[in-house]
Amino acid sequence: MQLKDFEYVLKIAETHNLSRAAEELFIAQSTLSHALNRIEAEMGAPLFDRSRIPLTITVPGEIYLEKARQILNLNSEIKNQISDVNNYQRSEITIGITRFLQFYYLPPTIPRLRKKYPNMKINIRVETAPKLTSLMLSGNLDIAFMSPLIQDGFKNEPLFDYRALVMMSQKNPLAKNYKKADGDYPIIDFPT
């Protein structure tokens, strides 16, 4: 089954007439009749009662029409969303970020976003990781920057690695766990 099959059946239902539907679809009536026969054979039931004029929709036809509308709407939504992503034509984006990362990541990123997409409104929500997770689940964020999250429905992408410097006395028990590393500072493994 193809998307055009759904479009054909919807047009027949809209016009209640094969000739008019074919005309509005810019195809021959015989092509539309063959397509309808094939679709009905695939479904195993007639979608229209052809003994009546105008054509009337059968119960299986009503079921088919409901699902056809949903499928065509989803197809349209998919195309629009992909187009938005490809063309960056969204007028607004909401970014969630943790307090710690906002100081590291936002200063270099926001000016570049504004330069590249000057007409896009950029909303920023600074929240804790659990709150960002909740906002993502409820669909109130487009993207979130936070520590990795392992949860169904989310995809994590590492953006950067960073080093943190911990200062402590050499007498501190954690200082015993350090290892010599290439570079200026030792690496410390924190016991778990």
Image: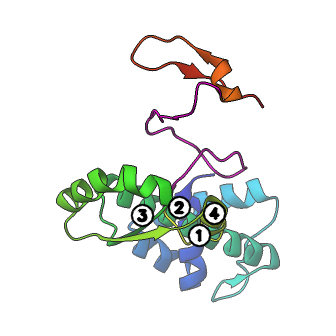
Looking at the picture, does residue 98 appear above or below residue 147? below
Q: Earlier along the polypeptide chain: callout 3 or callout 2?
A: 2
Residue labelled with disc 4: 36
Estimate the x, y position of residue 12 in percent, counting from the top left: 57, 76
- Report helix, strand or loop for mark 2: helix
Residue under pointer 1 = 139
Q: Mark yes or no: residue 32 visible.
A: yes
Which element is circle 1 on? loop
Of callouts 4 and 1, the N-terminal one: 4
Mark toward the start of the polypeptide (3 vs 1): 3
* Label 1 or label 2, whichever comes before in sequence order: 2
Q: Distance of mark 1 from mark 2, alpha carbons?
A: 20 Å
- Judged from the image, the secondary structure of the residue bearing numbered disc 4 is helix
Percent coordinates x, y for residue 110 in the rendering? 29, 59
Q: Secondary structure at mark 3?
A: helix
Q: Are marks 3 and 2 in contact (CB under 8 Å)?
A: no
Up the image or down, 11 lies above or below 88; here it is: below
Identify which residue, 46 or 151, lies in the foreground. 151
Q: Which residues are magenta?
A: 143-171
Residue type marked 3: Asn
Is residue 57 rendered to the left or right of residue 159? right
> Nearer the N terminus, badge 2 or badge 4?
4
**Residue at which label 2 appears:** 75
Of 3 and 59, nearer the camera is: 3
Point out which mark residue 80 bears: 3
